[in-house]
Every structure is written in structure tokens, then in C-alpha cells.
Amino acid sequence: MAVGLAQETAEQLLEAAQQALAQGDEEAACASLRQAADVGREDFEMMSQCGAMMAEVGPPEEATAILQAAIAMQPNGSHENYLCLAQLLEGAPAVTACQKGVDLLESDTLQAGEAGAHAQLLSSALCTLAETKMEVAAEDGDASALTTVQTEAEQTLQRSHTICASNPEPLQALAQLRSSQDRREEAVTLLKQSTALWLGKQGKEEGTGDAMQEGEADGQQAQEEPEGLLASLPPYAFRIETAKLLLDLDATTSSAEEVLEGLLEEDESCLEVWYLLALAQYAGGAPDVAKETLQALDDLLAKPGAIAPTDDPPDLLDLKDAVMQSMAGKNSDP
């Protein structure tokens, strides 16, 4: 009976953490998660859930400890625990955790006979594995070893794309790899193939003929199921990286602007997106529009509770200064 009460209390604490997080109170969420993990420390499912949530909002070391405790209870119990843990670790331990997560996911998929249902998940996990291996190899500084790892990673990414051709992640990862290899044209082609899988769903509907009909159908579905449409888009952070790559690789800035404008429509609280949009507009030859974007951000920041102020990255501060100086020079011209 005592165990049942303890379990109920752990569930209540987890629910309290979820409610606090929904209200934007990360400190309260972390406090409830710590209590839930303490009360439910012998419950694998509870520890797994607490670890995943703590990884999102809490100190990495606490999330790591909770996830490792869950894994110790059931080493083969959840691929999610390993994949989540891999994001918190560095170096070889991160690769080991990620590889274990992929192995478990593949095993679960084969046993369940649900390859189609797990295609997107497995494809994304393989991308994470390839990217983690390349990051670790790059940090080690061994050029020969890095080349070998990049070759293996390319094979993994191609397999990821084969498993789920509708997943934009492997194509974008391949684009990043080609960019690092100074194979710019290939990188641009791969990046455009990746964005073609989702960009029309995020922003304005474009195209003619069948493409336009598909856009209209998507628009009708978005009105009926807006949450489902949003869920079909790549993660917010992934799309920020897409915009950065487009700015770096694409000859024009229109696609980057479309990505960034869509991100702001979805969530206007990310300062990085505002500055990247101004950068895209400035680089695209529209300093007036870039200045308007920065002014809109200043207006938003002036509203109480709109966006919590943060330290701007130096490169973004340089961008803001460049736009303002350009506009000042233009206004002073006779």
C-alpha cells in the first residue's frame, strides 16, 4: 500500500512539473522533477520521464544522473533514454550512448514488425549518430581519422534517407558535410532538396498547376488541423540551422527569409531569429527592411514580459551595428 501511495505521489509531482513548465516556470518544474525522481527512484518509467523532462529544462548533470539511473535499472528498456543521454554527454561517451539507442531502436522495430511506423524515428536517430561521430572526430583534431569518420557518416546518412525519404534531416546533414568539404554546389543542391520537403508547409503557398493544387489542399488541411500541420514541420532549432545554411550557401536570401519569417510567425520570442532575418534582409540588398525588422524587435522588447532580455552574440551585435550605420549613411546622402 505504501508503494502505491509513493507511486501516486511521484505521478502527482510529475504532473505538477508539467503544469509548471506549461506556465513557463522552469524553476518550479525542476523542483517538482527532483522530488518526483526521488520518490519514484525505483520506477523505471518514472525515472525515464523525469530524465527526459529534466534534459529539456534543468541542469544537464541532473538530467544525466536521472537518465543513467533509469538505464541502470533496465539497460535495454528504452532507446529514448540513450538518445536523450547522448545529447547531454560529450566525446566518446556520447557516441556510445547514441549507438546503443540506435541499436535498441532497430531491434524494437524488427521485433514489432513496424518498420514503416518507426521510419521517421529511426531515420532521425541515424542522423544524430552520424553527426555525433563527426563532431567528436573533428574535436579530436586527427585529419585522417576525420576523413574516415566522414565517409562512414555519409553512408549512415544515405541509409537514413533511404529509410525515410520524407525526412529532411539526412539531406541537410549531407549538405553540411559537403559544405565542410568545400563542395559547395553539391551542398546547395542537397539543402534545396531538404527544404523542398517542408518549406511550403511553413510559409506562403507558392507554385502552379499540381504544386498549387497541393498547396491549396495543404491550406485546407491546415485550417482543419493546424496543430497537425505544425507537428509535421521539422523542429524549430532545425529550421534555424536551415536558415543559417541558406545564408551561407545560397546565392540569394529569399529562401532564408521565408524560413525565418515562418519561424517568427510561429514564435516571436527567439532573438536569434530576429537578427538572422535582419541579416538576410540586409544581405539581400534591403537595409531599410532590415532596419524595420530591428525596430520591430526593439518595440517588442519594450513591452513588459514580451521577451526576456539576453546577451546578444557578438556577430549579431555586429550585424545590428552594420545595418544601423548603413541606414545612417544613406540618410545623410544628399
Image (cartoon, rainbow, N blue to C red):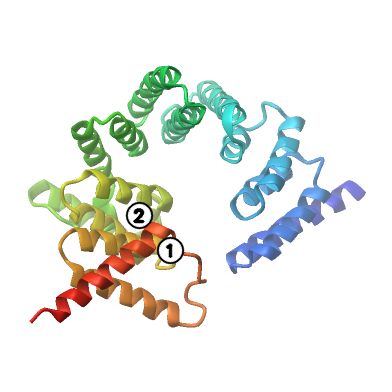
Residue 84 versus residue 26 in the image, above or below: above
Viewer-nearest residue: 84 or 90: 90
Viewer-nearest residue: 137 or 112: 137
Residue at the spot x=45%, y=18% of the render? 145
> Which residue in the protein does label 1 denote?
270
Residue at the spot x=67%, y=52% of the render? 59
Residue 109: horizontal and vertical position, in percent?
A: 51, 26
Total numbered labels placed on residues in the image? 2
Residue 153 versus residue 165 in the image, above or below: above
Query: Depth-wise, is mark 1 or mark 2 nearer the camera?
Result: 1
Q: Is residue 291 left or right of residue 61?
A: left
Can residue 261 be seen from the camera position used here? no
Q: SS class of the residue under badge 1? A: loop
Within 10 angstroms of label 1, few (less than 14), some, or many (20 or more) residues? few
Residue at the spot x=38%, y=20% of the render? 147
* Quadrant including the C terminus: bottom left
> Which residue in the protein does label 2 denote?
229
Residue at the spot x=65%, y=65% of the render? 20
Can residue 320 be seen from the camera position used here? yes
Residue 159: horizontal and vertical position, in percent?
A: 37, 23
Three-letter amino acid code of the residue under disc 2 = Leu
Q: SS class of the residue under badge 2? A: helix
Three-letter amino acid code of the residue under disc 1 = Cys
